Each structure stands twice: as C-alpha cells, then as structure tokens.
Amino acid sequence: MCKQVSFFAVFLAVSFFPPVAMSQSDVIVLPGAEGKVEFITAVAVESSDAVIASRGRRAFNLHGAYKVVSANQAAFTFQIERAGSTSVLLTILSGNPAQTLHQETIIHDTTLQNAVLRACDRAVERTLGQQGFFAGKLAFVGKQRGVTEIYTSDLLFSSVRPLTLDRALVTGPSWSPDGNKLLYTTYYKTGFPDIYMMDIEKRSRTPIANFKGTNIGASFSPDGRRIAMSLSGTGNSEIYVSNRMGRNLRRLTNNRSLEASPSWSPDGRRIVYTSDAPGKPQLYEIAASGGLARRLPTNVGNYCSEPVWNPVYSNLIAFTVAVSRGFQIALYDADKRRAEVLTSITDSAVEPVWLNDGRHLVFTRREGGRTGLMLLDTKTGKASALHSADFGDASSASFVYQVVSLG
C-alpha cells in the first residue's frame, strides 16, 4: 500500500479560535463583481531561515486574499521557524503591541517543505476561515526538449519530478481522491490513446481502457470507487462509467454527437460533460447512474467545453469558453442559471481545474505557441504564473490535496 501522508500538531497556545475580525485599517478593499467588495488582508511572513521565509511569502502572494507587507503594516504576522528536520513552529501574531493568537508545531513525515506549506495552510484556516491549498500537489503534462511526459510538483514548482518515461504523447492526468493513483491517457504502447492507472508509490501502471478507438478523459469519482471516461469504440465518443479498475462498464450517453470531458459532482451523483449535439460544444448534465441528459443554460458563448465541477460549492462549474479569437475560463452558477467569464488572458486560457478550497483554479495559458500553468483566484480575479518559462511547456493540470491524519 502507498504510505499514508501524516502529520501531527502540538498546540502550544490557543488550540482553536474562529477567524479574527479585522478593522478597516487591516485590509485593502478591492471592487468585486456585481458591486461586491473583496477584502485583501495585509500579512507579514517571517523566519530566521531565508528559504522558509521566501517560500512562505511566495505562497501568500499567490493566494489573492492576502498582500504580503512588512510586519509594522500587517494585520497578522506569520512566523514560521524550523523545529526539526521535517517540522516547523507556526506562530500567528496580531495587534500592536503584537499578541500571540495561535502557536503550534507541524510535523510532516517526509519533507520540511511540506511542513512549511501545511503551516501556511493552517494560517489561512485561522485567519480566513477557509481551507488552505498550498500543500496540495499537481500532476500535469510537461514538455521539455520536444518530449511530453507526466510530471508532478508542488504548487510552488520547487519540487518537480517526472512520473512517466513514455517518450510518447500523454494527456489528461487525473488524481485519485487520496493522491495515491493517477489516471492518464498515453500513446506509448499501441500508438493509440489508451487509459492507464499509475500506482504512485510502486510506479506501476495498469490498463483501464484500451479499446478500439479513443480512450480519454478519465476521472475518479469523489469516493474513488468509480471512473468516468470518454470512449469511441462504438464509432463516436460517448460517456461511460466503470468501477475503479475499469470493469463493469456502463454507458451513459448514446447518440450521434461527440461527448467528452466528464466531471463528477461533489456528491458523486451527477456528471457534467461536453457534447456537440447542438452543432457546437455545450455543457450537459446527466445522472451518474444514467437517464436523460440536460443542457446547462450557460448563455455565454457558442463554444463551451472542459467543464469541472466545484468540489465545495455544488452550484458552480468552471469551463472553457470561446471568446473573440481565443478561449477564456468561465464560471456557471446553477443557482443563477447563467455564466460569467473570469479571465482576460492574452491568446487563451483553457483546461481549468479546481483546488480543494473551491475558490481557486489552476488553468493552462496558451500564448505565442507556449503553454504554462497559472493560478486564478475566482474572488478577486488575480491570476499568477506558477512557474517560469525556463521549465518548458506545462498544461493539463490535475490537483489533489491529500487527506492527513492528526496524531
């Protein structure tokens, strides 16, 4: 079995407290959509270790809800000090004179860096009242020297390693909910697109779908027991659901149009996907057990594709929409029965994927023949590059935040 990621916390001061109320002097106010106001909290990140301080500041600069400032200007100061080879001491200070609001030691069983990022996540929880995402991990398609492979990395791109050595076209990586398995499509063995599942610890892989035609778009259900995928063995691509090993296939769609990009609802009961039944791609929803499909009234463009269901807010679905001469990321709200465009990236923004907090997205930016991964805060609209061009091309991200145990 894959080794479980775990850490435990030792509370040294206040064990639990709700997000702290802030005065007007503590925040920077930004105008939001539809007259809403977004508050950006001023914070300082300090450490006697320059590497820890740098990583902490980069993390909070990415978030969108924080602005990193000096300690004398901050509403909160996050002190992160090395406590061991794979542990850090997090102290949260507020006020003038500064008062300790929270302090705990966070120990991770593999790396100091992961302990630092989990400390940053804990600081988000304590000050914003939302989940942190910094300690999550990405899988993505990387292209270096003309060769594409599946890579994995932390969100800061400070720990990047290849997962495949196929030296063939690879697409569509998708994590299992526990982060121990990875689905992806590869052409390496047959020259045709087949779906494989990789065991991350063993570095072994098992064929999930290698039928005649294209086998693409595989994704695990939220409980990890089922897989949705797009198969074209019958002539045109349709949406199927199987068990976690690709067996007991159940066909959900059956028509003359092309169906692709299935994504599960948070409760695992429904699937959203793309269909060109209207003539151009639009979003449809169907029960995971089968039944009648329903078109979603996005009303934002005549080309909508690559839907991804928000893991926290079941009324929200992000997707790619054709805008002018390129593509942008849009957000459909089922409660309002309409969508809005979130990005205004030069050339194109495509392939959205939600992070665990239901607020942030990672997407692929296409510009000048190059691709790169970016982080988007859907509340403030802040978009930040996750890596430099020196890495090479990166696209088709999948994100997972591994469940941890305390103790």
Image (cartoon, rainbow, N blue to C red):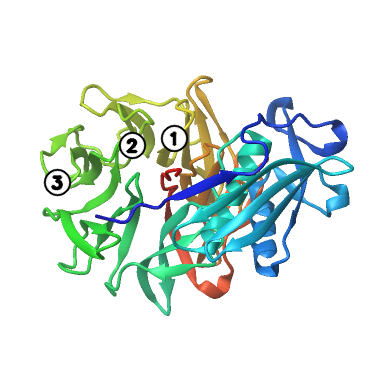
Q: Helix, strand, or loop for circle 2?
A: loop
Q: Which residue is mark 3?
A: 235
Direction from residue 145 to residue 291 in the image, left or right = left
Q: Which residue is mark 2?
A: 222
Find the distance from the CA under tag 1 to the CA under tag 3: 32 Å
**Residue at position x 86%, y 32% from top?**
24
Give the residue type at disc 1.
Pro
Where is 325 relative to 258, above or below? below
Q: Residue 188: which quarter of the image? A: bottom left
- Tell which of 23 and 10 is nearer to you: 10
State yes or no: discs 2 and 1 in contact (Cβ < 8 Å): yes
Query: Which quadrant does the C terminus fall into?
Result: top left
Direction from residue 354 to residue 70 in the image, left or right = right
Q: Helix, strand, or loop for circle 1?
A: loop
Mark 2 or mark 1: whose residue is earlier in sequence: 2
Query: From this viewpoint, is residue 93 visible?
Result: yes
Q: Which residue is mark 1?
A: 311
